Image (spheres, helix red, strand yellow):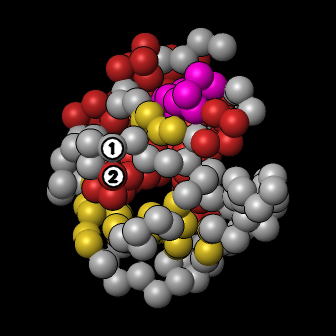
Amino acid sequence: MQFPDFFADAPVIRLRDPLADFLGAAADGLIDYRYEDAVRLAGHSCPTVASAFLMTRAALAALYGDDLPVRGEIRVDFAEPPDAGVAGVIASIATLITGATADTGFRGLGGQFNRRNKLFFSQPIKAGSLRLTRLDSEQSIEVSADLSKVPGDPRIAELMPQCLKGDATIDEQGLFQELWQDRVRRILLEHADDPAVIQTSNT
């Protein structure tokens, strides 16, 4: 699978997963999640997928500081219901990284490593679109993304309908893809730590 080159330059999220450590799936339970992983899960690369990756990254950094986040020990809450807008897409990325699931995840072993009942929708959230909570300390961070700060090329609005209808030429299709992924690139590489785009708030 050939990804755009800039994927490799996107931030990396490192966590410690006690279950992966226990079962010998990863040395010391250390797992790196890259933007490519989010794209493989979603099946596409777009501003929503990029922002979901970065929002989860920012919330984990705020919660854990210099310590490694502990996968499977994090609760994730969403303000919207699961079928609203892009909530489901964002939730899938958050689940990938944190391990939190509603009722479909791993049940655990001997009372440990349970991944269920840690992902909730339609929750009261004050300032963000999702909230991450450390289950060991109950500390929470709300996070949201303002993608209007990273606008796309205006030609995208003209090219997308043509591409969807099959009326675009090969060159027009190529230009649309280039412009679309350029916005994703700018979000990931130029605004990953931009507080005007990825906004966190203590609860």
* Residue 127 drawn above or below residue 69: below
Q: In which quarter of the image is residue 181?
A: top left
Viewer-proximal residue, 138 or 169? 138
**Which residue type does callout 2 highlight?**
Tyr
Labelled disc at residue 67: 1
Disc 1 + disc 2, Cβ < 8 Å: yes
Tell me the residue that label 2 is attached to: 64
Magenta-highlighted residues: 26-36
Local crowd size for mark 1, using a 10 Å CA cut-off: few (<14), some (14–19), many (≥20)? few
- In reply to whether residue 117 is colored magenta, the answer given is no
Q: Position of residue 195 (x, y in %)?
A: 18, 54
Provide residue 99's location: percent of width, then percent of height.
63, 51
Kindly tell me whether residue 168 is visible in this rendering.
no
Q: Left of 125 or right of it: where is 40?
A: right
* 157 w.r.t. 203: above or below: above
Q: Which residue is drawn at 39% across and 41% down?
A: 68
Q: Residue 124 carries which label?
A: none
